Image: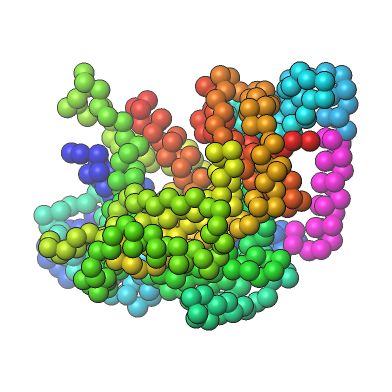
Amino acid sequence: MNKKEMVDKALREIDIQYVEEALEPSPASEASPLRQFVRKPVFLAAAVLLVCLIAGGIFAAVYFRHQEGPSEDPTELVAESTEPTAAPKQYKVTLISEGNAGEKTINMESDLSYRPFTSTTAPKELTVTFQGKEYTGTYWMSEKLPGSGIIRDEYHIDIDRRGFAQFEVNSADQRLLSMHINARYDFIVAGADFDAWELAQPVLSKEEIEALAVSYAKELISLDEYSVRLEIREGPTVIAPPSDTPEVEIYECFFCSMVQGIETTDQASVLLTDRGTFYYVSALAPGWVAEHRDELLSFDVEAAMEAANEASHLTNPTVKVRRFGIDENGQVFLMLFITGSDTEMPLLLGVTEE
Amino acid sequence: MTDRQIIELFLQRDECGIAELERQYGARLTRIAEGFLSREDSEECVNDTWLAAWNHIPPDEPRDLFAYLAVILRNMALNRLKAEQAEKRSAEVIELSEELAACIPDPKADTEGEAIFSLSDVLNCFLQAEGPEKRKMFVLRFWYGKNFREIAKRFGCSEAKVQKTLNRMKHRLKKVLARN
C-alpha cells in the first residue's frame, strides 16, 4: 500500500464523531450571549482601557529594566545598538508573525502584523474600471498586509460554489489594488477546471505571456522601475485533459521594485495561463519605494540582521532577509526570517532604524 | 433496532432493512451530505447511499454501520460533484490526500514490510489530542475538502490563520507518525 492509499484508508476510518462534530456551529456562526455582551460598546471601552493600563505597565517595566541592563526575557525583541561607532544607530526589532520557538513560544501582537477587520467607513458598494470594463462589488472585509502600509478593502462581485470574482482597493483613495476574475477557491492549491474551450486554444510563447501580463499590470502600477520575472506556477495544472491536448500551464509574472538587491513590498503579480486566460493581478503596496529610495539605500542591512539575531534569543539563529516594507506611519523597515535550532517555524521580524 | 439487527435484515435481503436504516441514520447522513452538496442533491445522495449499502451488504458486514455509510456517502458526494463538472473540488480532495501523505515518513529499512502502526489509529489519537477547534478545521479540510476561505468564514478568522493552523497540525502529525 502506498502512502496515498494509506491516507485514503485512514480518512475512511476517521472517527465518525469527528466527521459530525466538524459540522457543528462554530463560534463565528453563533454568537453566544457572552459574545454579544463582549460586542457592547461599554465592554469594548472597558477592554480598551484595561489594555492601555496593561500596556503602560509593561512599557514601564521594560523601560526601567533597560535602564538596569540587558534583559534575559526571550519574548522581548527590543535590541540594543549593535554598532560600536561614536553615533550608533538604534534598531527596533518587532515580531510580525509569531512562530513556534520550541518551549519559548513567542506570541506578541505587532502593529506590523497581518490584520483582517471589518471597516465601518468603506462604501458598501463600489464600482471600479478594469481593462475598460466596469465592475461593481459588495464590500466584504478589510485587511492590512505586513509591510504594505495601507489598508485594503475587499469587494466581491459574485460568488458561487465554483468560483468568484473580487477586487481590492486602497482604503484611503479607492485606487485599485487587485482584480481577480476567473479565480477559483484554492485555485493555486487545487488547480482549476479549465473548460474545453481553453484547452482548444493555441499555447502562447513566454514572450507573448509576459506581454499580456504587462498589459494587466499596467492597470495597477507604473512599470518604469520594476524588475520582471516570469515563472511557471508549481503544482497541479489541468485535470485529465484529452490525451492529445497539452496540459494548461499556469504562469505567474512578478513585478518587483528592488533596492540594494533586496525585494520590496512595492510589487505586483499577474496570474494567467499559457492559453492567455487571465486570473488575477494584484499589487501589494504600489509606488512607495520611489518616495523612500534614499532611506532604503542608506539602510544598514548587515547591522539590522545582527540586531534581529541578538534580539531573537534563539539558539543558533539564522537570519535571512525577506524584503523591505513600510508601516502605516511611513517608516521603512526590513523584514527578516529567523530560525534557530529550537524553532519549528521561522519567525518573521521587522527591523526599523531609529 | 441495533446495527447488527439491521445488517441481519440486509443479509436476509429484507428491504425493511433500508427503511430501518433511513429511520435510524437518515437525518445524520443528510447533514453530512450537506457538508458537500446542496440540500436537494444531498437528499438524492443519501438515497443513493441506501442503494449502495443494499448492493454491498452482503458481502460486506460493517462493524460500525454509520461510519460505513458515511464513507459511501462521501464517495457518492465526490462523484456527484465530479459529474456536475465540479472537477476542481474532487481533484482538490485527491490533492489533499497527497498533501497528508507527505506527512508519512518513509519506512526504515529494517522495518520495511512490517505494519509498524495503523495510520487511522494514530490519526484518530492525534485528532483527539488536538482539541475540538483544530480538529474541526482538520476534518473540514481533509474529509470534506473545504477550502481555507470556507473554513475561515465558519470560524470567523482569517484564511491565513486557518492555513497556519493546518500547517502546524501537519507538522505535528508528521512528528507523531515518525515516533510511531
* Residue A202 can be seen, yes or no: yes
Q: Residue at x 47, y 71 (%)?
A: A165
**Viewer-side residue, A49 vs A157:** A157
Q: Is residue A250 magenta?
A: no
Residue A203 position by quadrant? bottom left
* In-image side of A286 versus A41 (left or right): left
How was the colour assigned to the protein in this rendering? Answer: rainbow
Q: Residue at x 50, y 81 (%)?
A: A133
Residue extent of the magenta highlight: A38-59
Give x and y (percent) for residue A202: 23, 68
**Viewer-side residue, B40 vs A216:** A216
Q: Is residue A44 magenta?
A: yes
Quarter holding the C terminus of chain A is: top right
* In-image side of A56 versus B139 (left or right): right
Give x and y (percent) for residue B78: 28, 63
Give x and y (percent) for residue B37: 36, 70
Give x and y (percent) for residue B40: 35, 78
Residue A121 against residue A146 in the figure, above or below: below
Q: Residue at x 19, y 60 (%)?
A: A246
Residue A241 against residue A139 in the figure, above or below: above
* In-image side of A305 versus B137 (left or right): right
Query: Which residue is situated farthest in the front direction here?
Result: A224
**Viewer-side residue, A206 vs B167:** A206
Prevalent SS, magenta region: helix
* Residue B3 can be seen, yes or no: no
